[in-house]
């Protein structure tokens, strides 16, 4: 199977280290500051959708969680529920797992 160039690029990227954020604690920190999700997104330079996902406990990259910690002037460990999470395999448009190039 020949992959489109964009999927070759995704398949060749190293896996991102994912962690589970403490959504309730992050929501508490946001509310203490009187910030909205769009304000948080602007402060950490990401999408509102990403902020929503993280505040609801969805897995995110360590670098993203670090940006949240910096914005809230805390440590990543205090806003993380657990250690690393195994990322899902990259999938092709047909739903087939992609093999890592290299």
Image (cartoon, rainbow, N blue to C red):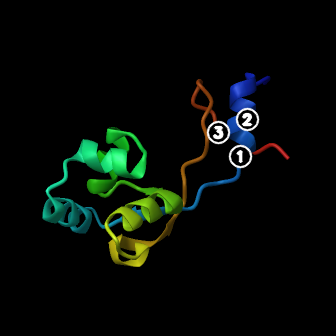
Residue 99 appears in the picture as rendered: no
Distance from the alpha carbon under mark 2 to that under mark 1: 6 Å
Q: Is residue 61 left or right of residue 24?
A: right
Please rate how many residues cluster around mark 2, counting C-alpha atoms within 10 Å: few if below 14, some from 14 to 19, many from 20.
few
Please rate how many residues cluster around mark 3, counting C-alpha atoms within 10 Å: few if below 14, some from 14 to 19, many from 20.
few
Q: Residue at x 36, y 54 (%)?
A: 58
Read off the residue under disc 3. 97
Q: How far across and how far down the image is residue 73, in percent?
A: 34, 71
Q: Is residue 47 left or right of residue 93?
A: left
Dividing the picture into quarters, in which one does residue 10 lie? top right
Q: Mark on residue 9?
A: 2
Label 1 element class: loop
Q: Residue at x 38, y 61 (%)?
A: 68
Q: Nearer the viewer, mark 1 or mark 3?
A: 1
Q: Mark on residue 46?
A: none
* Mark 1 vs 3, N-terminal side: 1
* Mark 3 vs 2, N-terminal side: 2
Label 2 element class: helix
Q: Residue at x 38, y 39 (%)?
A: 47
């Amino acid at each position: 199977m020949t992959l489109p160039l964009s999927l070759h690029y995704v398949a060749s990227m190293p896996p991102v280290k994912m962690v589970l954020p403490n959504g309730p604690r992050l929501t508490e920190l946001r509310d203490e500051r009187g910030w909205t999700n769009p304000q948080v997104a602007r402060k950490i330079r990401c999408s509102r959708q990403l902020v929503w996902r993280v505040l609801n406990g969805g897995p995110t990259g360590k670098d993203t969680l670090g940006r949240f910690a910096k914005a809230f002037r805390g440590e990543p460990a205090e806003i993380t529920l657990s250690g690393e999470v195994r990322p899902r395999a990259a999938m092709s448009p047909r739903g087939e797992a992609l093999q890592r190039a290299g």
